[in-house]
Image (cartoon, rainbow, N blue to C red):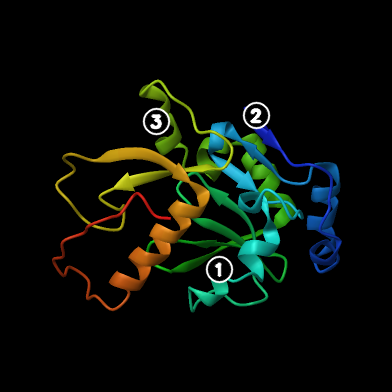
Amino acid sequence: MQDITYVGEPVSDAATFKQLPYELQSFLLQHNGLIAYLGGIHFRGCCHEPKWHSLREVWTGDTAFCKIYPKVKASDIPFAQDSLGNQFLLRKGVVWFLDSETGEVANLNVPFQVFLIGIERQPDQALDLSAVATFRQLGTYLQPGELLAIFPPTCIQTDGQNVKISRMSVESRLYSLADLYRQIRRLKPGQKITVRTDENHP
């Protein structure tokens, strides 16, 4: 993979590691998670610190995705995320995609190893790197422990004007996505709303 900005320390969370399927264990033994394509994708690791890199935190911790999004199962392994905080889940050996704004999940119909090969061979097709490219045009880069935030949210149809992109800590971005999901999950398609965000949380 290209443009790697972070590589995790060797596996330190043995309890979580033992629960993983063989293909994911093999990957994490080579590099215990990493950030590639200048933040385009973040593979989590089996570690206790830093918490933003910990697979345990988002799989079985207090803020696990399965506790926030009903369509995510407790057995789904949130092994990676894109630059905006959308999640890649491993479900019975197959990669699924979680839209963290809407809570919708989609089966990508590829096993883990094929997913990796696709990213390495055609990253621009396997991943949406447009937000990272836009952010780079502003003359700055994502740092490890950060995600991008787009306002208005991408799930809300707008006139395309005054779209803002900024960077936030992983914790703050995932919190804001979960909060947005809770606010819009009962809305009807096409319903008009006003969106306000608090970028200072937590």
At 37% from the left and 66% from the top, the residue drawn is 179
Question: How far apart are labels 1 and 3 at the CA level?
Answer: 28 Å
Q: Between tags 3 and 2, which lies in front?
A: 3
- Label 2: state its secondary structure: loop
Q: Are marks 3 and 2 in contact (CB under 8 Å)?
A: no
Residue 29 drawn at (x, y percent): 86, 48
Residue 135 marker: 3
Image quarter hosting the N terminus: top right
At 38% from the left and 61% from the top, the residue drawn is 101
Mark earlier in primary sequence (1, 2):
2
Q: Between tags 1 and 2, which lies in front?
A: 1
Of residues 15 and 160, which is closer to you in this image? 15
Tag 2: amino acid: Gln
At 13% from the left and 66% from the top, the residue drawn is 192
Question: Relative to 163, is 108 on the left or the right?
Answer: right
Crowding around mark 3 (Cα neighbors within 10 Å: few <14, some 14 to 19, many 20+) is some
Crowding around mark 1 (Cα neighbors within 10 Å: few <14, some 14 to 19, many 20+) is some
Residue 2 drawn at (x, y percent): 65, 29
Question: Relative to 107, is 74 on the left or the right?
Answer: right
Tag 3: amino acid: Phe
- Residue under numbered circle 1: 63
Q: Are marks 1 and 3 in contact (CB under 8 Å)?
A: no
